C-alpha cells in the first residue's frame, strides 16, 4: 500500500499546497484526487505570485478583466476565485460525503492587513460572500491582530484557515479564538457548525536553526514543535469543555501541518510527512513531496498523542541556546513579511501584464 493511501486510511487528510490554472486545465489535480487520495488544497500569496508570474496561463484573463475595469487586488481576487472555485468543485463530493469536514480549498486575505483587525474582518466577510462557495476557507494569519479577527469571522459564520502558526502557544491562542467565536454563536442561537483548521508551519523551524545547532540536533526542531502542539490538540479534544461544544453540534478545528516540504537537500522529500502521520489532522504538501510520498511504500509510524520525545528534544535545543518562544515570534513576523513581499510582487506582475504604468490603464 502506498503511503498516500496509508495516511488516508489513518484518517489524515492529504491536501495539495499549490494551485495553478495549468493544474486544473491539464487534469493533473483530478489525477491527484483519484490516484493519491488528495482531498483538498491550500494557496498562499507566494504560490499565486509564482503561478501568475512564471507562466502565461493568466495573461488572457488579466487582459479581459482589465477591459472590464478591474485592476490591482480586485483583479487578483477574481482570478484566484476562478481557480479556487473550480478546484472546490472537484472536492465537493468528498466535502459532502464527510459532512463538510474535508474537501476544502483556501484563499488568503491580503497579507498587507496582518496588523489591521477591522480590515481583516471586513476582507474575510467580503471574500466569503463573493465566493459563494461552501468549501472555501478564508485564511487569516494567527498574528495578534489576526486572533481577534478569527473570533469575529467565526462568529460571522466564515470558515477560517488560521495560517502562520509556529508553536503550541500560537496554536492555543488560535484555538481559543475559534472556541470564543463558536460560543458566541451558541449563545446567539446560531448554527455552531462553522469549520476551521489551524495551520502550524514545520520546516521553517529547522531552516532557521540549521547553522546554529550541533549536527545531532539538525532537522529535529520542527518535528518536536509539531509533537508538542499535537499533544495540546489531543488534550483539547479530550477535554470536558470540548465535549460541551460537540454536544451543541460544533465541529473540531482540525490541526493542519503546513510547510512540510523539506528545505535541506540532504533530507528525503517525505521526511516531515512521515513524522507527522496522525489521525484527525491535515497535511498540506507541495507537489514534489506528494509525488515522493506516492512512490513511498514503507509502513508509517503514527505520531504519539502524548508528545513522545518532544520535551526532551526541546530541552536539548534550550541547552544549545535556542529560545523557542522568541523564535516562534520571529518566524511568524518573517512569514508575514514574506507573504507581504510576494503579494506586492504579484500585484506588480499583474500591473505589468495589464499594461499599467503608474496609474491603472483600463482598456475600452
Image: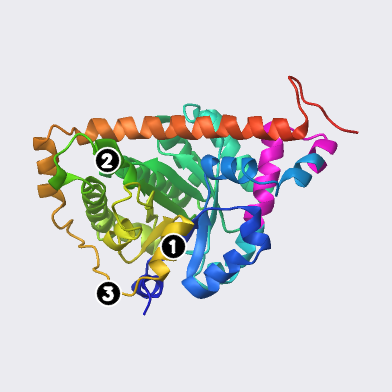
Q: Secondary structure at mark 2?
A: helix
> Which residue is the extreme one toward the front?
266
Tell me where the magenta segment starts and ends, as one range. 64-85
What is the distance, in whole Å, between disc 1 and disc 3 at their CAs? 16 Å
Mark 1 sits on what residue?
Answer: 290
**How many neighbours does mark 1 have within 10 angstroms: few (below 14), some (14-19), or many (20 or more)?**
many
Residue at 33 percent of width and 40 percent of height: 173
The x, y position of residue 26, in whole percent, is 66, 64
User: From what the image shows, is residue 78 above or below residue 351?
Assistant: below
Q: Position of residue 91 (x, y in %)?
A: 57, 66
Residue identifier under label 3: 299
| Position above or below: 172 against 296 | above
Predominant secondary structure, magenta span: helix
Q: Rate crowding at label 3 as few (under 14), some (14 to 19) or many (20 or more) other CA atoms within 10 Å.
A: few
The residue that mark 2 highlights is 169
In depth, the one of 170 and 7 nearer the eye is 7
Decide which of 21, 156 is in the foreground and name it: 21
Residue 198 location (% of width, % of height):
39, 49
Quadrant including the N terminus: bottom left
Q: Is label 2 in contact with label 3 (beta carbons under 8 Å)? A: no
Q: Nearer the viewer, residue 348 or 243?
A: 348
Note whether 321 is above or below 60 in the view shown: above
User: Going by the picture, which residue comes out furthest to the bottom?
Assistant: 1
Amino acid at each position: 500500500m502506498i503511503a498516500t493511501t496509508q495516511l488516508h486510511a489513518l484518517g489524515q487528510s492529504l491536501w495539495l499546497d499549490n494551485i495553478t490554472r495549468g493544474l486544473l486545465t491539464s487534469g493533473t489535480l483530478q489525477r491527484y484526487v483519484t490516484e493519491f487520495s488528495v482531498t483538498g488544497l491550500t494557496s498562499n500569496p507566494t504560490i499565486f505570485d509564482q503561478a501568475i508570474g512564471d507562466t502565461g496561463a493568466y495573461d488572457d484573463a488579466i487582459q479581459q478583466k482589465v477591459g472590464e475595469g478591474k485592476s490591482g487586488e480586485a483583479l487578483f481576487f477574481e482570478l484566484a476565485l476562478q481557480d479556487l472555485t473550480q478546484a472546490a468543485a472537484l472536492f465537493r463530493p468528498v466535502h459532502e460525503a464527510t459532512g463538510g469536514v474535508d474537501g476544502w480549498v483556501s484563499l488568503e486575505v491580503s497579507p498587507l492587513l496582518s496588523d489591521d483587525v477591522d480590515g481583516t474582518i471586513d476582507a474575510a466577510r467580503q471574500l466569503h460572500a463573493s465566493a459563494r462557495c461552501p468549501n472555501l476557507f478564508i485564511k487569516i494569519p494567527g498574528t495578534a491582530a489576526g486572533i481577534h479577527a478569527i473570533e469575529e469571522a467565526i462568529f460571522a459564520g466564515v470558515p477560517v484557515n488560521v495560517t502562520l502558526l509556529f508553536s503550541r502557544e500560537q496554536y492555543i491562542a488560535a484555538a481559543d479564538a475559534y472556541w470564543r467565536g463558536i460560543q458566541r454563536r451558541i449563545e446567539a442561537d446560531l448554527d455552531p457548525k462553522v469549520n476551521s483548521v489551524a495551520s502550524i508551519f514545520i520546516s521553517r523551524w529547522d531552516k532557521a536553526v540549521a547553522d546554529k545547532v550541533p549536527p545531532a540536533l539538525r532537522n529535529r526542531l520542527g518535528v518536536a514543535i509539531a509533537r508538542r502542539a499535537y499533544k495540546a490538540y489531543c488534550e483539547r479534544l479530550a477535554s470536558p469543555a470540548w465535549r460541551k461544544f460537540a454536544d451543541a453540534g460544533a465541529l473540531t478545528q482540525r490541526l493542519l501541518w503546513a510547510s512540510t516540504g523539506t528545505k535541506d537537500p540532504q533530507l528525503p522529500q517525505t521526511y516531515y510527512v512521515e513524522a507527522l502521520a496522525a489521525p484527525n489532522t491535515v497535511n498540506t504538501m507541495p507537489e514534489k513531496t506528494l509525488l515522493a510520498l506516492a512512490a513511498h511504500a514503507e509502513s508509517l509510524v503514527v505520531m504519539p498523542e502524548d508528545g513522545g520525545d518532544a520535551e526532551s528534544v526541546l530541552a536539548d535545543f534550550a541547552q544549545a541556546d535556542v529560545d523557542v518562544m522568541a523564535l516562534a515570534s520571529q518566524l511568524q513576523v518573517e512569514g508575514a513579511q514574506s507573504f507581504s513581499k510576494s503579494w506586492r510582487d504579484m500585484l506588480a506582475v499583474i500591473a505589468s501584464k495589464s499594461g499599467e504604468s503608474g496609474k491603472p490603464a483600463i482598456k475600452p
